[in-house]
Amino acid sequence: MTTEQRLEQLREQAWDKGIVAGRGVDVTGGPIPRRSGYYGQPVVKPPVWTWEIPIYFFIGGLAGMSAVIAFAGLVFHEIDLARTAMWLATIGAGLSPVLLTIDLGRPRLFLNMLRVFKYKSPMSVGAWIVFAFGACVIPGLIALELGTRYSFGGGTDQFLKIFAHLLVIGSAFWGVLLATYTGVLLGVTAIPAWFLHRVLLPIHFGSAGLGSATALLELLGHRVAPLSALGFLAAAIETALWIWLEIDKHGAADRALHRGLPGWLIRGSEFLSGPLALILRLTNLVPLAAIAFLLGAFISRFGWIEAGKVCGRDPEAVFASQG
Amino acid sequence: MPGLGTSFGRGGATTAQQDLANADCILIEGSSMAEAHPVGFRWVMKAKERGATIIHVDPRFSRTSALADIWIPIRAGSDIAFLGALVRHIIENELFFREYVVHYTNASCILRDDYGDPEDRADGYFSGWNEDARNYSMQSWQYKGEGLSFPERDLTLQDSQCVFQKLKRHFARYTPEMVEKVCGISPALFYKVADTLVKASGPDKTAAICYAVGWTQHSKGVQIIRTASILQLLLGNIGRPGGGILALRGHASIQGSTDIPTLYDILPGYLPMPRGGEEETLQQYLDAHTPKTGLWSNTPSYFISLLKAYYGKHATAENNFGYNWLPKLTADHSFFEYLYDMADGKMEGMFLIGQNSAVGAPNSRLQRKSMAKLKWFVIRDMVETEPARFWRDSAEIERGELKTEEIETEVFFFPAAGHAEKEGAFTNTQRLLQWREKAVDPPGDCRSDAWFIHQLALRLIGKARAARDPIDEPLRALDWWYPEDRFGEPKMEAVLAEINGWKTPVAAATDRGSIEGVLFGGVDREGNHHHEAQIDGYEELKNDGSTACGCWIYSGVFSRDGVNKANSRKSRDYLGHGWGFSWPSDRRIIYNRASARPGGEPWSERKKLVWWDSGNWTGIDVPDFKKDKPPDYEPQNQERGLDGQRGDAPFILHEDGLGWLYVPKGLQDGPMPTHYEPLESPVHNALYSRDTNPVVNWFTRAENRFAPPGDPRFPFVLTTYRLTEHHTGGGMSRFLSHLSELQPEMFVEVSPELDEPEWQNHPSSRGSVSFWRSGPVTRQCCQ
Amino acid sequence: MSRSWKVRRSPATSFPVVCRAVLLFLIGLSNRRPNLVCRRIYTPNSHLPAHRMAEDFRAVTARRAKCGETMIGEGTQSTNQRRHNYVQENVEVGFFTGPTVCIGCKACEVACKEWNEVPDDGFTWIGNSYDNTGRLGASTWRHVLFLEQDCQKGNQITGLMGLSDAQSEDPFRWIFLSDVCKHCEEAGCLEACPTGSIVRTEVGSVFVQNDVCNGCGYCVVSCPFGVIDRRPQPLPDAGGAFKCTFCYDRQKSGLVPACAKVCPTESIVFGRLDDLRARASQRVEQLKQSGYEDAQLYDPQETSVRGIHAFFLILGEPEAYGLPPKPQVPTIYLKSAWTSALLTSIAALIAVLGAFLFFG
C-alpha cells in the first residue's frame, strides 16, 4: 500500500469512526535520525587553537632539538655545526612566543602566562620552558658567537666560552623538554584521541623534533655522520610509532586518528617521516629524505590538532573512551 | 467571563494560584499552563510533589503534558462532549457530593413547566427558539416560584422538573462511547480521568480545574467553562481550598481589563453598559439591572457612585447624576464589527494601544488592509511593531495588494514606556491587584499610556470648553482632577484612590489634607475642594451621590487607613494575604462559605478554610459572606438584599445565593451546555442535528470567509499556541535578543503521520501561512 | 563599553613580572585554594546601567530584612529565596537540578544572561526539540536540555501509553533539564589554567577572573564536561574563556544565583552542598518509590573528578543528556605523559651524544 493510499484510508477511518486506529505512515526521511548523546552535540569542547599552534609545535620541537645538537656539537668540537644549530634554536625561540601570543584570545595579556607556575598544568610548565629556553638560547648564541671569534682576547674570551658552554647546556636541557612537553600538553586533556596516546605523543613529538632538526641542519650543509645516524634513528622511530598507532586502536574513541582528514594527515605524515625518509636515507638520497621528514613532521602536527577537533566534536568518542 | 459569572456570580477565577498546591487533582484543559503561565505552574508542581495527580487534556503534547501524570489527547473543540460525559458519569453513578449539591447549588430548584430540553424536543433546540431572529427567548427557562430570588425547591432532587433531573436528562447521551467517537478518547482513558477526579473530591479532598484561552476563544467557550463549572459544583469543589476553577488569563492584567473594562458593553465592576431605547433614563436602567436579593441588589449604589466618580460635582440628583452624558449602546461594536467598519471606511481613525492587531488578531491580512482605509491611525508601543509599519513593510505591500504611495492613512507612532518604566497596578489571573513601582525613567520621548490619555484628555477638555458646543457637554462635565508630576505624568495612586472610592464633599472647603483618610489633599488640580475621606469597602457605597467609586469591586484597595494595599508585600499565610489585594475585599478564595458544612463547621480538618465560630464567620480567608449571618438563617418575608438569602447560600451574587448548575438568565445559547462543533470543524456534529452553535454570529463577508463544518477541502485543524519564550504578539519579546535567540523562527508541529516535505504551506479559507520546518519536532496526537 | 563593575587591573602588568611570578609560584605550590580577592567590586553608584538600578540589591535586601524574608505561599521552605552568608562563612554550596519538575521555560538561561551581561550568540534555528541553544559555551552558561525519548516517564500516561501493557506501543517521553557548569571538586579547567585566572572560591565554586584570562584555550580542552569555552569575535569581551560564575558576585552579597532565583518550580535548587546531597538522595528514593525506576543521581564521586558542586537528578542514562558517564580530570594523565616525555628527553640526549661519540 502506498503512503497516499494509507493516508486516504486513515481519512476514511476518521470520517466513519471519528477515531484512527493503528499506525500512520512513515514519511520520506523519517523516522528522524537518532544521533548519539544529546542530538549529537559534542560532550567535550574541541580545541579552539588555530594554525599557529601546530606550527609552533613544529618550530618548538625543531628548535629544542637543535639546541641539543648544538650542545653535542660543542662537546665534540663541531663548532660550526653548534653555531648553526644555535642559530636555529634561537630563531625558533624567537618565533615560538610570537606564535603562541598570536593564538591567544587576548594577546595583550600574554605576560600573564608567567604570572604563576603550576606544575599540574602542562600549559604553565610549557610557558616557563619556552621562557627558560629563550633565556638560555639567546644569550647562549651571543656568547658562543662572541666567544668563537676571539675578539676580546684573553680572560674575557675564556669567560665567554665557559659562559657559552653553560648556556648551551641549559639550552639543551630546556630544549629537549620543549620538544617533548608538547606531547604532554595534548596528552593531558579531555580529548580521547589525545589522552589515549599520551605516552606515544611525547615520543613522537620528540623524535619528530630531533629528526627535523637533523634534517634541516643537513639541508643547511652539515652532512656529517652523527647527523646521518640521528636521521636514521628518527625515521626508524617514526616508522615504529606508525606501526604502534595502527595497532593501538581504541575503536570509536580515537577513530578521528584513522579516518577522514586528520586520519589521512597523520597517516601521510607518518609515511613521509617514517618509511619514506628511511628508504630515501638507505638509498642515500639524504636531501630528499630530509625534506620528506620535515614535511612529515610539519603535517603531523596539523594532523594531531585536527584529530583533536574532530574527536572533540564526536560525542561517541567520549562515551567510548569511558565505556 | 459569562461562563464563570453566570455559574457562580463573579467573572473571575474562584481561587488563587498558590492554593493549587493544596489540590489533590488538577485538571488542565484548554491551556498549556507550564508554557503560558510558568510562574503559576510552580504551585501545580508543588501539588504534584505532595501527591496530587495532574491531568492535561490537550490536542498537542506540550511542555505541560510532559509534566502531567496523565495526558489525554483530545480532538480540538470537543471539550463539552468530554466534560459533559464526566458530568453524566458522576450523576449516573451517584458519585456527586450530595450534601454540597443539595444545599449549595440550584440542583433542587424547580423549573417552569414550559421549559423544554433539546433531548425532549424534535427540533433539537432549547425551548424558546425563534428561527427568524436566530435567538432564544429566555422566558421559559425560569424557575417556578417568586422569580430568581425565592424559587421552589425539592431537596430530595426527585421532582421531574427540578434542575438535577433536567441535567441528568440533558447529558444522558454523553456516554464514554460517544466520547470516543467525538473526542477520540478511548473509554479506558475516560474512566481513568473520571475515577481520578472523583477520588480526589469529597469532604477531605478537592480537585481544581485550570483553563485558559484554549477554551475562551472558542465560539462556545462560555459553555465549555459552564460544563467545567457544573462538574466542579457536582464534585463540591468550589469555594474550598485546593478546589475551584482557575481562569488563566492571556497576559498581565487581562483580568483587570474586564474588571475595569476595555470592552464596549460593560462598565467598571461588571455593570452593564446602558442600552439605547429601553434604558434611556437612569430609573429605567436601575430597574432593569437591580435584582431583589444578593449583592447586585445594591446596583444603584454602585452605579451612581461610578457616575459621581466620572462627573464629580457635575453629577447631581437633579440631572440624574449625569446619566444622559453616558453613551448608550445601539449596536454590536465587538472586534469584528469595528474591523468591518474600518474596512468599509466608516471608521475615520483609531488608537491602537497595547495591542498588535497586525500579528495577533484573527485574519491579520484583513486587519492590515483595513488599516489602510483609516484617515488617521495612532499607535503607541515600545518598539515599532507591525501595525506601525504596515504601510511600508507588510505581506500586503510585498504581494502588491497595498501600495505605500496609495495609502492615505496618516500614521502617528508614539513611543511608549515599558512596564518597568511606569507605575500602576496589574490585576492578575487570580483577581490580585499588585502595584508596580517605576524602576527607571523611560528613555527619550517614551511616555506611559496614562500620560498619553491624561494629556489627551486635558487637551480635549480644553478644546471642548473653548468651543462651547452642546455635543461636548460630557467632556466639559468630566471630573479630570488628577494631580501630576513635573513631567505631566498623572499620579497613578490618585487614580487608584478614586477607584477605591471616597465620600463626596458636603461642607465648605477646609484644610482637608490634615483629616484622616483624605488622600491627595482632597483637592483637585485647581486646588478646589474635591473629595472627603476614603471609603473602606463597597458596603459603604450610597445611592444618593454622597460617595464616588471608580470600580465597586476594587473598593478597599486604598481605604481610609491610606495604605495602598496593592503595594503591600508581606504575606502572612499560604494564601498570600498581605501581598497585594485580591478583589473583592481581599478574599483569595471566593464563595468560601462553601468550605463549611451547611451547619457552619468545616467539611474536614484537612480542607478547612472558613467556618462559623461563636456568632461570626471566621477562618484563614476573609469570609465571602455576611459576617454575622448564622448558618441556619432563613429569610422570613422575602427581605431585600443579602437578608433575602439563606444562611447556607454561599454564592451571594446570585439572587438565590446558589451555584448555578442550570443558568436561568444571562446566557444567549442555552441554560445548559450542549456540544456543538467549532465553526470550521472538519467534521459534522455527532450529537445533534445542528453542527454549530445556533446563536453564533457568522461574521461572513468576502474577505473573511469561513469554511462550513465538514468542508472536505480543509480536512486539518491548525491550532496556534504560545511558547514560553515569547509573549503575545511578540512586541515585548521578539525584539529582545535574549528571548529571540531561544525561539528565533516560526515553526509548525505536525504529527509524524502527516509529515510532509520541508516547506509547509498551510492554506485556509482566509489565507495561507508558510513555515520552515526542520529537525525533529515534538510528536503530537493525530485524531 | 560602560560597565557596572569596577575591574581592578591585572597586577601582572604593573608589578615586576619575575618578583610576582616567584611569589605566586610559591602560592601555587603551597595552597590549592588561595584566599580569593574578588575582582568585581560592587559599587552602588551611578555607574549602574538602567536595568540594574531596579535591583540595587543592597536596598532590596535591606527592605527584605526589615519585613522578615518570606516567600509568597511557602514561607521559608525554599532555600532558593533565602539570604545567606555562605561566602563569608566559607560554606561549600551547590546546585541540585532535576528534570522531574523542570518545565523547560528557559528562565534560567535568560536570567543568567541578563544578570551576567552575557551576549546573545546567534539566532539560529537548531530545532533539537524546543532547544535552539545547542549546548553550554562561552555565551551560554545555563542550557535547558529537551530530550525526546522512546520510553515511559515514571508512571506517566500519555494517551493510551501507560494505561495497560497491551496498549503501550509507541511510548514517548519529553524531559527537560537545565545544564550548567559542574564546578568539579577536581576541576580540569582550574588545574589547566596557566595564568591563575581560574580560581576556587570560598564556597567551592570555580571562578574565571575575566581580567586575568589571556585566552590560551587550554581550559577548553581540559574540561571533561565541555563547559568552558573561549568567546569568539565579534562578541563583546571576546577572546577570554567564560563559563558559569556561580553568580559569585550575587553570592558575596548574600543573594542566590540568578538562575536558581528565577526558577519557577525550583527545579534548580541552590544551597549548602551537604544539605543538597542529602536531599538529593532522599529525592531519588522517593522518585523510585513513585514509579521512576530509572531515576539516578549524576554526581561522579567515584571518578577522579571526585564529585561536582552542580549535580543532577537524571532519568535514564547520562549519555542521553550529553553527560560523560565517567568523567576524568585530565591531571590523572600527568604521570604517564610526563614519564614518557622525560624518558624521551633523556633518550634524546643520550642518542645525540651517542651519535656524536660513535660516529663523530
Image (spheres, grey):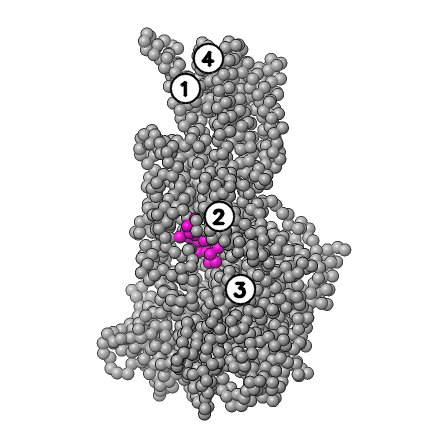
Amino acid carrying mark 3 in the image: Ala
- Residue occupying the far top of the picture: A154
Dot label at residue B52: 3
Question: Measured along the vertical axis of the image, is residue B734 above or below residue B337?
Answer: above
Q: Is residue B479 magenta?
A: no
Q: Chain of mark 3?
A: B
**Residue A39 seen in the figure:** yes
What x and y, as percent, mark residue B197? 57, 69
Q: Which residue is mark 2?
A: C311
SS at mark 4 in the image: helix
Question: Which residue lies at the image location 42% right of the left edge and 17% below the top edge?
Answer: A169
What segment carries the magenta color? C256-273
Picture coordinates of residue A215 (x, y %)? 53, 18
- Which label was assigned to residue C199? none
Rate crowding at label 2 as few (under 14), some (14 to 19) or many (20 or more) other CA atoms within 10 Å: many
Residue type pointed to by label 1: Gly
- Asked if the residue at tag 4 contacts the one at tag 2, i.e. Cβ–Cβ closer than 8 Å, the answer is no
Rounded to the nearest angstrom, the CA distance separating label 3 from label 1 is 75 Å
Residue to which mark 1 is pinned: A170
Cα gap from disc 2 to disc 1, whole angstroms = 48 Å
Residue located beneath label 4 in the image: A73
In the figure, C292 relative to B252: above or below?
above
Describe residue A108's horizontal placement relative to residue A272 as left or right.
Answer: left
